[in-house]
Structures are given as structure tokens and as C-alpha cells.
Image: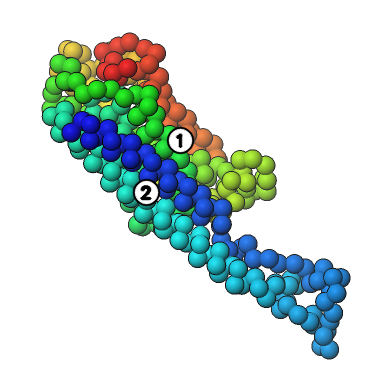
Amino acid sequence: MSALSDQLVSIATLVYLLAMISHAVEYALGNSRARAVVAPARELVGAGVGAGPTGAVDGPAVNGGAVVSPATPGRAERTARRAELGGRIAVGLTAVAAALHLAALVTRGLAADRMPWGNMYEFVLTVSFIGVAAWLTVLVKWPFLRRLGLFLTLVMVLLVATAELVLYTPIVPLVPALNSYWFVVHVSTIVFASGLFLLGVVPAAAYLMRAGYENGKRSFPYTLAKRLPAAAGLERLTFVLHAFSFPIFTFAVIAGAIWAEAAWGRPWGWDPKETWAFISWVVYAGYLHARATPSVRRNTATWLAILGFLTVLMNLFGVNIFFEGLHSYGGL
């Protein structure tokens, strides 16, 4: 089972990569209707296209002071079909990768005879799965957000590949402090909230780029947002995801304190992981407060959401790598 789990992770990483490439194809092709070849009428007249008896320009049809080549609609439709096909293939591949990802977690859990959250490798795999599963659920309700799939699958490739190549840990029994029903209660909720925060940071970053593009910025990275959904929709999605996940994260922190009381005789001791969990909680609470305050700009509030995810990454990677404490179960 352990070997099968490892193989499934490798295959899932490859399929995520293929999904990312397919999303990139759709993103590059863009909206064919917006990419139609349009030229000002005066330029075509200057190129030898004369005016007809009624004063209209002979040749290509004029629309709103511009001339569109007769061949353009056909090219546009073909491009649109290719973009749509690329997008559908990308979503299908993402779903297949997610299924393989889930199978890898299940087989890992069966091999370990416990929930697959006992070390950093397993935790990263589980958080990333929650993120992609939540993404596929969001697409069912808001399919127009599919263009974000390029960025989501890029994050998935980076996280799953890092887990496989850098964080991999052979299956070992749980340390005694983790042998408790609180292991399921606390870790499952922290994993779920972290997965939603992972998903939430994608539209947050996309919103900042798109808002800049809509405000006339044409330098990198704002040009990447040219074909993203409108900034207002991205900002709203960012808020919805964080408003949903923050109470779950709050419960996870409280459950961790109760578990600490049972395991170590004190609910809070400013252990490095406890400290960074508290920092994450404060930053995300600050984001939601800023988002609900009319005088705070949306860009400022969104930067807080991104900062919150950076603290989550610090808690996940930095604390396990650079600090020693009662939560040092990273397996590195």
C-alpha cells in the first residue's frame, strides 16, 4: 500500500502538470471574440480599399468605425473552440489528478493504519488535496472562474512535487502525544481550513493583478491578468472563501488548546507552532475586519489575506524546519 501511494503521488503530479499546460493553452488562446482582427476603416482605405457609392467602405464590413476582415469570424470561432476544448481538458485532467491524489492519501492511511496526517509530507498532501477539491466545487457554481485554473494547478504542481521530492517520509507510527481522538478533531479542521486558505490566496493574488490591469497598468505582472474575470468578482470570491474558512480555523485553534491541556497539562505555552497559529489567526481576523470596514480599500484588505497565507506557510514549513518544540513532528 505504501509503494502504491508513492506511485499515485507521482502520477498525480504529472497529471496536475498536464492540467496546468492545458489551462495555459486556454489562457493563451483567450477569448477569440476579443482577439478578432480589427482595423480602423481609414487604414484600410489608405491601403487601397475605396468607398462605395453610398460612402461606405467597399470590401470588409464596417462595425462601429472599424473594419473586420471577412475571414476573421471563422478564425475567431476556431480559436474559441480550441480554447474551450483546452479548458475542458484542463478541468478533466485536474479532476483525474485530484482522484489520484485522494487515492494516494487513502492508500497511505491504510498502510499506516491511521489518518494520513502524521508528518509534514502527509500534511502537505492533505492540505493541497483539500485546496483542489474545493476548487473543483467552486467551478460547479461559478464555471466562468475557470481561467484561474492555470494559477491553481501551478500551485498544486509546486506543492505536491515539493512534498514528494523534498518532504517525503517513510511511514512510521505516531508519536505518543498524537495518539488521541483529538488528533482527528484538531488536525482535520486545521487541514480543512488551511486547504481553503490555499484556495483563497489564488483569487486574492489574481484580484490584485486584475485590479491593476483595469486601472491601466500594463507592466508585469498586471498583463497576466488580461484574460482573468473582473476584479470585483475575484475580490468577492476571496472574501467568501476566507469568511467560510476562518471560523473553522478558529475552532481548530481552540481544539488544539484543549488537546494541549490533555496532553501536556497546559492549554497554551507559546510553542513555535502555537505562536504562529495565533499570528495567522490575528492576520486573518484583521483581513475580515478590514474587508468589513468601508474606509479600508479593497487592495489593502486583500494584501492582508495574502500575508495571512504567508504566515500559514511559515507555520507549515518554517516552524518545522527552523524551530524545535512540542509540535516537532515534521519528519524531516
Nearer the observer, 69 or 273: 69
Residue 1, placed above or below residue 152: above
- Residue density around tag 2, few if under 14, some if 14–19, many if 20 or more, within 10 Å: many
Residue 113, placed above or below residue 207: above
Residue 209, placed above or below residue 92: above
Amino acid carrying mark 1 in the image: Ala
Measured in 3D between alpha carbons, the distance from the residue under mark 1 to the one under mark 2, in whole angstroms, is: 25 Å
Residue 94, which numbered label? 2
Nearer the observer, 236 or 38: 38
Residue 215 placement, left or right of 3: right
* Coordinates of residue 108 in the picture (x, y in percent): 21, 32
Residue 48 placement, left or right of 37: right
Q: Residue at x 71, y 78 (%)?
A: 61
* Coordinates of residue 133 in the picture (x, y in percent): 31, 46
- Residue density around tag 1, few if under 14, some if 14–19, many if 20 or more, within 10 Å: many
Residue 279 placement, left or right of 100: right
Return the residue at label 1: 305
Nearer the observer, 251 or 167: 167
Q: Secondary structure at mark 1?
A: helix
Q: Secondary structure at mark 2?
A: helix
* Coordinates of residue 136 in the picture (x, y in percent): 35, 50
Q: Residue at x 36, y 12 (%)?
A: 323
Nearer the observer, 285 or 259: 259
Residue at the far bottom in the pictured view? 53
Q: Residue at x 62, y 50 (%)?
A: 214
Image quadrant containing the N terminus: top left
Image quadrant containing the C terminus: top left
Based on the displayed image, in which of its 4 quarters is residue 111 positioned?
Answer: top left
Q: Earlier in the sequence, mark 1 or mark 2?
A: 2
* Coordinates of residue 91 in the picture (x, y in percent): 39, 53
Camera-side mark, 1 or 2: 2
